[in-house]
Image: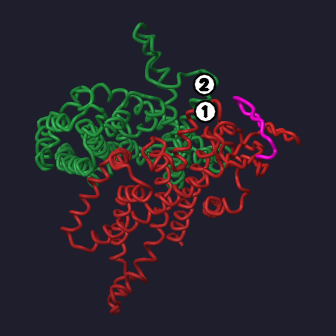
Chain colours: A red, B green
Amino acid sequence: MRHADGLHVGSVGLGLLVALCVLGPAVLPAPPAADPARSALLPPGAAVTEITLSDGRVLVSPDVTVATEAIVVRGPYRDTELSPADVVSIREGRFLLGSDRMGRDIASRLMAGGRFSLAIAGLAVIIALLVGGSVGVAAATGGPLTDSVLMRLVDALMAFPLLFLLILVATLFRPGPAALALILGMTSWMGLARLVRGQVLALRGRSFILAAQAAGASKTFVARRHFLPNLAGPLSQDTALRLGDLVLAEAALSYLGIGISPGLPTWGGMVAQGHRVMVEGWWLATFPGLAIAALVISLALIGDGVQERLSRGAVS
Amino acid sequence: MVRTVVRRLLLLIPMVWLVATLAFVVVAAAPGTYADTVDHPGLSAEQRAELEARYGLDQPVHRQYLRWLGSLATGDLGVSFVTKEPVLRLLARTLPPTILLGGAALLLDFVVGILLAVAAARRPHGWFDRVSSFIGLGLAGLPSFWLAGLAILVFALVLGWFPASHMRSVAASGLSGPARLADLLHHLILPACCLGLVGAAGTARYLRATLLDVHGERYILAARARGLSDRRILWIHTLRPALLPVITLLGLSLPFLVSGSVVIETVFAWPGVGLTLLSAAHARDIPVVMAVTVLGAVAVLLGSLVADVLAAVVDPRTREESL
């Protein structure tokens, strides 16, 4: 029962993270604009005043005095005095999770980075499922020669230290988000191919499959009705854990500066930027790290929970 | 058993060839060559062509491949494009730090992991079990580079207990032998803990489940019926069979000695193989990239062989099947 709870906690955690990253920008109040000269490195929860001027400039500072004759915006280097005639609008705002060195809101960058991380890892896992599934089925059903050729290829690819391969490909090809998903997917399907091959081989000898074939069921019927449902459990457990590994791998690449373009927000890249100013601003690296952990732990709980249910199902 | 080990060792050769070929395909398919990374405004087209000719980069791909494979077969790993240092000497310089860091981490991983698992399995679902499994789950999900940054912030920058990076102090060359060793260990502690404790969380989680499985066996009941103490049952009768999968895990973790620490080496500026690979890949330094990749593959393949041999040594039942 306790592990079934793990499945629930994991699912709720994953759902919340996805919802926050996708819907967050629409639901939460708009974050203050970035003003590198005045709003850099503000701690979590810092209240600021955002002033839009008629010439298009936006000043964001935690320390603003508004009087009828002049508006004084204090900055770390110098104060700016504005005449009320130049000011288009004044808005109060808050950096929920603080701001980074460029004065950008960390909360909204986290949500944008989460969308990238989730999309890349999700796409990569779909690619891995397609490639690994096809290779596994082909190896299990294609005769001994196909089987040994494909499995030796899988062995050779698995002999690559994964991080070495990722570093090599990511540095040499400088991928964008879609290409990175492709690379991650193409480097992590081998375990899935082994799993699918083993499962198909084990299932093929089971009596209910033989019975269906003896009764004259078509190949597609047996595949859809008997193989797929029995593969779904182990595959979903593997997929949940693999997704967590892919999120960590993507974060590690971004941290090393060889993930998707450094200009785009990614959780790993945000941790790397935060590490450069860890004494002045602990919050820069803390929140993206916790976001990665929350996502990976949710996925691990889901994977463990599914396995627990599977082994219980096998017993009963 | 000796014969099967020899056979497995011979099987390594085609596997290493396959891996090396795959690595070569990746490098050859990538856009740009070493000449592109030489970003010098005075570099004329002729000098560029001369540069590519000097390193054989102007030859057709299959010629480059055959030449590289030929020198690999004779043990010649070539010379680094960037530093002009023989690759073999480069590896001799960067491999020991990596093995030191990885070895210390693996030691921590298994010692701490086994102790934690035994302590947790003594009273399943007791407070220690719950707290340690909760912390273990957290450690397993936290990215290692983040944890390393936190460790640097707390233990190096705020508390000042350990140095924040590098393997030696600037003044280390002037120190006497024992003092130099102490200096090295002082630098080793933080990165080794960051690597090892994350691994220990995983090992403990895995071993705890195995211990509880073994705990349900009849021979444990029999041992209890014979009046053996709980401690003896746990350490001798339960731990020994439960350690078998852990030993397999240890063998499979050996490649970790070479590849597991790229990220941690980067965070701590540890002068090892991972850091070398990263800079070599950036500079399109093909001889170094290929040598490090092949080395990593050999480590993985040897690791799985060692895992099987260790399992066979510990458990006679697996002797015929797994080898």
Q: What residue type is labelled 2?
A: Leu
The part of the chain drawn in magenta is A73-86
Is A82 in the magenta? yes
Cα separation, mark 2 vs mark 1, equals 9 Å
Q: Which residue is drawn at 31% across and 35% down?
A: B39
Residue type at numbered disc 1: Met
Q: Name the residue under label 1.
A: A278
Towards the viewer: A151 or A86: A86
Residue A10's spot in the image, x, y percent? Answer: 61, 60
Residue B222 visible in image: no
Which quadrant of the figure has residue A199?
Answer: bottom left
Residue A294 lies, in percent from the top left, at 61, 52
Discs 2, 1 touching: Cβ within 8 Å: yes
- Identify the chain of the residue marked 1, using the numbered disc in the image: A
Decide whether residue A35 is among the magenta residues: no
Residue B181 position by quadrant: top left
Which chain does the numbered disc 2 sit on?
B
Q: In this view, does B203 lie to the left or right of A179?
A: right
Q: Which residue is drawn at 53% across and 60% down?
A: A303
Which corner quadrant holds the N terminus of chain A? bottom right
Mark sitting on residue B157: 2
Q: How crowded is mark 2: few (under 14 residues within 10 Å), some or many (20 or more)?
A: some
Image-based side of A54 in relation to B164, left or right: right
User: Where is B295 relative to B317, above or below?
Assistant: above
Residue A115: x and y in percent read: 56, 58
